[in-house]
Image (cartoon, helix red, strand yellow):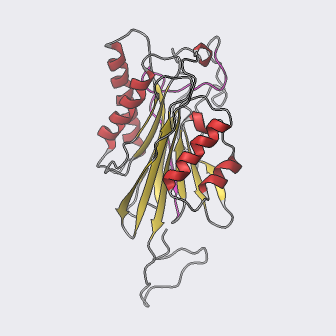
């Protein structure tokens, strides 16, 4: 399904990645958290882990609080080279929850929330410094009561994936990075084509990319920052996510794998799994459709 994206042509005032300097020497281990939510005819299990990379004294990633009551899941990455990156990512997560919790999100509402966050982060940073700061972000939330369809939204180069179990095991990228390379734009002097060209907090966005994707019973959504996805291959994702271990353990294993593969950046993984409870089908209901659909299928 195609997704709608923000208009192109914005120019970010954040300094390029080449301006970053190492300040710490040892990455801190992640601390994974896991929780469950009841939904109609099933449940949602979620887990998150985040680790400070060796380039930072403090973790500049942020994510939805573990155990938060709303079925809204957010991962944000403070942009390196920008001012107050840790503040930008945490303000972004907080603003999105304040704007979207308690309502079934749609594309227009998410875009409004992103623009509100953009202004709020800029105002917050301006109280401390004249230098700009921002964050990239990805979020997901169910759009129906069965949680069989999910809204995915993002700005920048945080990503969403789906581990799909229909037929052979598939690992699908659900987002497209807002990088200069992908948007066919020229980076600023000293920047890289793989730097984010869209972000929230410095005016370099007009909303968000939005898509709606299906999620079958047993399938997984994975949200992550670039400290993970730049260092873990699709085959490694499939191997780790297919393990019969708790989601929190899989989060830890993905971050450990990214570090082992050379990641020095902050790294965050948030996993969401939908489980549908099987129910007996009344005799008066028609038989299942050829593709396995129908009542009680967990779709």
* Residue 117 higher or lower than 81, as above or below: below
Residue in view at x 55 percent, y 14 percent: 15
Quadrant location of residue 231?
top right
Q: State the residue lying farthest toward the front.
A: 26
Q: Nearer the viewer, residue 293 or 45?
A: 45
Residue 208 magenta-highlighted = yes
Q: Is residue 53 left or right of residue 169?
A: left
Residue 78 image position (x, y, % from top left): 47, 26
Query: Is residue 98 depicted above or below 79 in this figure?
Result: below
Magenta span of residues: 191-216
Q: Main secondary structure of the magenta part?
A: loop
Quarter-of-image position of residue 147: bottom left
State whether residue 32 is above or below residue 44.
above
Residue 42 is left or right of residue 56, and the answer is: left
- Outermost residue on the bottom side: it is 283
Q: Nearer the viewer, residue 46 or 28?
A: 28
Q: Position of residue 205 (x, y in %)?
A: 47, 27
- Residue drawn at 57 percent across, 33 percent down: 157
Q: Is residue 32 visible?
A: yes
Where's residue 256, x and y in %? Answer: 60, 41
Q: Residue at x 50, y 55 (%)?
A: 247
Residue 175 seen by the camera: no
Nearest the viewer among 39 and 228 is 228
Magenta segment includes 195: yes
Q: Residue at x 37, y 10 (%)?
A: 129
**Residue 54, how many percent across, how many down?**
57, 26
Question: Measured along the vertical axis of the image, is residue 64 above or below residue 246?
Answer: above
């Amino acid at each position: 399904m195609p997704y709608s994206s923000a208009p192109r042509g914005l120019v970010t005032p954040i300094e390029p990645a080449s301006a970053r300097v190492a300040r710490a020497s040892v990455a801190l281990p992640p601390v994974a958290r896991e929780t469950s939510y009841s939904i109609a005819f099933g449940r949602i299990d979620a887990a998150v882990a985040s680790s400070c990379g060796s380039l930072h004294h403090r973790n500049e990633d942020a994510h939805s609080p573990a155990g938060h009551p709303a079925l809204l899941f957010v991962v944000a990455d403070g942009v390196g080279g920008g001012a107050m990156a840790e503040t930008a990512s945490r303000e972004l997560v907080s603003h999105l929850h304040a704007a979207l919790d308690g309502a079934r999100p749609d594309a227009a509402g998410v875009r409004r929330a992103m623009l509100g966050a953009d202004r709020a982060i800029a105002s917050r940073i301006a109280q401390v410094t004249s230098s700009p700061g921002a964050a990239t972000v990805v979020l997901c939330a169910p759009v129906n009561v069965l949680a069989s369809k999910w809204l995915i939204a993002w700005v920048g180069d945080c990503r969403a994936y789906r581990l799909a179990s229909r037929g052979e095991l598939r690992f699908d990228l659900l987002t497209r990075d807002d990088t200069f390379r992908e948007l066919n734009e020229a980076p600023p002097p000293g920047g890289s084509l793989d730097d984010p060209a869209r972000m929230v907090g410095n005016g370099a966005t007009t909303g968000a990319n939005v898509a709606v994707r299906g999620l079958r019973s047993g399938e997984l959504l994975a949200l992550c920052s670039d400290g993970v996805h730049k260092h873990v291959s699709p085959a490694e994702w499939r191997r780790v996510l297919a393990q019969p271990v708790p989601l929190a353990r899989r989060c830890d294993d993905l971050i450990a794998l990214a570090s082992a593969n050379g990641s020095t950046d902050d790294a965050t993984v948030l996993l969401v799994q939908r489980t549908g409870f099987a129910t007996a089908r009344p005799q008066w209901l028609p038989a299942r459709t050829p593709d396995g659909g129908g009542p009680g299928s967990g779709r």
